[in-house]
Amino acid sequence: MAQTEAATPQEAHHEAPPAGTANVAPDAMSMQQLMIWLTQQQQMYQTQMQTQFQMQMQQTNNRFEHLLASQGERRKKDPPMYEGKFGEDLELWIFAMEEYYANKRGLMEADKSDFVTQYPAV
């Protein structure tokens, strides 16, 4: 947003003296002029903050929609189970678990609790 607002009350006074008043020294700025300048600065700050919050919300919504779209229509799969039976390969199970959770990384890192409710600890 490119607004040309005065940086100080003195600059505001020099740039736009009120209609019908003579040029007054910066130190002699009236209380009313100071209040007008402060109000303008506050409004400009509020506008900037509102714009920033809107941009952040849009980015968050875009990220959320991307996560939902990337999940597609995949069905929930349970993680691989290891029961400790004879002949069961522990290293293969560890590899399968790493692969399973690597595919869920985006969902796990999202700032939502869906991962916890969708994949509760066993």
Image (cartoon, rainbow, N blue to C red):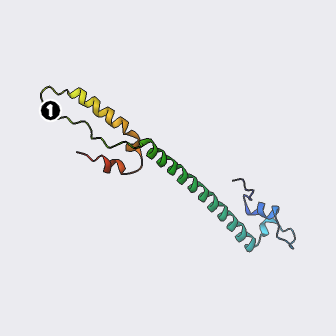
- Which image quadrant for residue 13? bottom right
**Label 1: which residue?**
84
Count numbered badges in the picture.
1
Find the residue positioned furthest to the left. 86
Q: Which residue does the image show at 28% across and 34% down from the upper left?
A: 97
Label 1 residue SS: loop
Q: Which residue does the image show at 25% across and 46% down from the upper left?
A: 121
Q: Which residue does the image show at 55% across and 52% down from the upper left?
A: 58
Reply above or below: 8 against 77. below
Residue 57, percent from left and from top: 53, 54
Residue 29, percent from left and from top: 77, 69
- Which image quadrant for residue 93? top left
**Residue 99 vs residue 36, the one in the foreground:** 99
Q: Which residue does the image show at 27% across and 47% down from the upper left?
A: 120
Reply above or below: 14 against 80. below
**Residue 111 vs residue 8, the one in the foreground:** 111
Residue 67, percent from left and from top: 45, 45
120 relative to 44 in the view: left or right: left
Quarter holding the C terminus?
top left
**Residue 54 vs residue 30, the one in the foreground:** 54
- Which image quadrant for residue 19? bottom right
